[in-house]
Image (cartoon, helix red, strand yellow):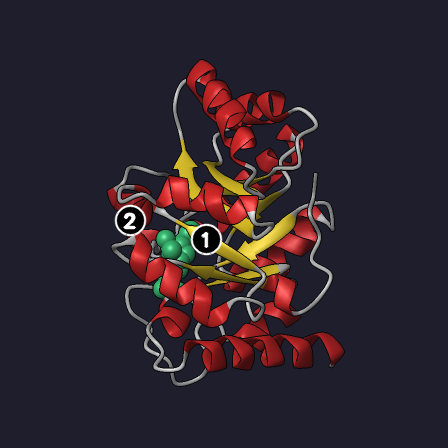
Amino acid sequence: MTLRPETATDRLMVALDVPTVAEARTIVEETRGAVGVYKIGMQLQFAGGLAFARELAGEGQKIFLDVKLLDIDNTIGKAVENIVKMGVSFVTIHAYPKAMRAAVAARGDAPLALLGVTVLTSMDDGDLVEAGYAEGVADLVGHRALDARTAGMAGVICSPREAKALRGKVGDDLLLVTPGIRPAGADIGDQKRIMTPADAIRAGADYLVVGRPVVGATDRRAAAEAIVAEIEGALGG
Ligand code: C5P
């Protein structure tokens, strides 16, 4: 189950990183049709986001549940079985081989794209050393992407800066989903490995995850449309 994007709009995943479902609902109402996928992450999951995800998926909206699962195989498998029942389209699992294999087995033939988290885009080499890893970001991302492909995952989350090298390494089999997207002039925030939407697409990204540049915009619909136009330009050029 790879879930390839068809249009430029399909490729825009907006992160509903807000404290309440009421605020998330407003963002969806303002941007519906201009955004391909809504991503529901940790913040909203702890405030009714799972029921909201189920509701939107039930209306036919593509939903990305960013739960970043990591646990023992049995628990991962049971969690994935229940996530399949929610009707969401994408879910994240930390790219540990055993966890990914358990998730792939539990998903079976269900229309759920499993995405491996390689290295969070807020991390640099120094952060990995601090966390006890021997490999730097580039090596660890490449290593985990190959493990994701071997496990039968649909794709990986990576920085757009790693997209080009990863395409060379894993071929066209894996979807590359890239957060750390900032249109020119936007605030970087805590992201460390960023790129513009057009550059990310040119580097081989299939989907772009965008949070603050859309959610924090005065005119969110216009912000989403501008990103889609930039994606379209990069696909055509
Ligand atoms: O606001 P911003 O555009 O930085 O949001 C990026 C989103 O992508 C956040 O929801 C963040 O949790 C998520 N993400 C990330 N890096 C990863 C995986 C997910 O930034 N490696």
> Is residue 192 in sight in this rendering?
no
Residue 169 versus residue 225 in the image, above or below: above
Beta carbon of the mark 1 residue lies under 8 A of ligand 1: yes
Q: Image quadrant for the N terminus?
A: top right
Beta carbon of the mark 2 residue lies under 8 A of ligand 1: no
Q: Position of residue 62 (x, y in %)?
A: 57, 51
Instruction: Find the distance from the CA under tag 2 to the CA under tag 1.
Output: 11 Å
Q: Secondary structure at mark 1?
A: strand
Q: Are marks 2 and 1 in contact (CB under 8 Å)?
A: no
Residue 29 versus residue 199 in the image, above or below: above
Depth check: give the residue in front, 1 or 49: 49
* Residue occupying image coordinates x 69% and y 43%: 2
Q: Position of residue 46 (x, y in %)?
A: 27, 41
* Residue occupying image coordinates x 52% and y 66%: 32
Question: Which residue is denoted by mark 1 in the rendering?
Answer: 39
Q: Check residue 201 in the rendering and tell me which mark sits there, or answer none.
A: none
Which amino acid type is marked by label 2?
Gln
In this picture, residue 36 sits left or right of residue 132: right
Residue 182 versus residue 153 in the image, above or below: below
Depth check: give the residue in front, 110 or 119: 110
Q: Quadrant of residue 167?
A: bottom right
In this picture, residue 195 sits left or right of residue 198: left
Question: Which residue is denoted by mark 2 in the rendering?
Answer: 43
Q: Residue furthest bottom?
A: 185
* Residue occupying image coordinates x 69% and y 58%: 5
Q: Secondary structure at mark 2?
A: helix
Which amino acid type is marked by label 1?
Lys
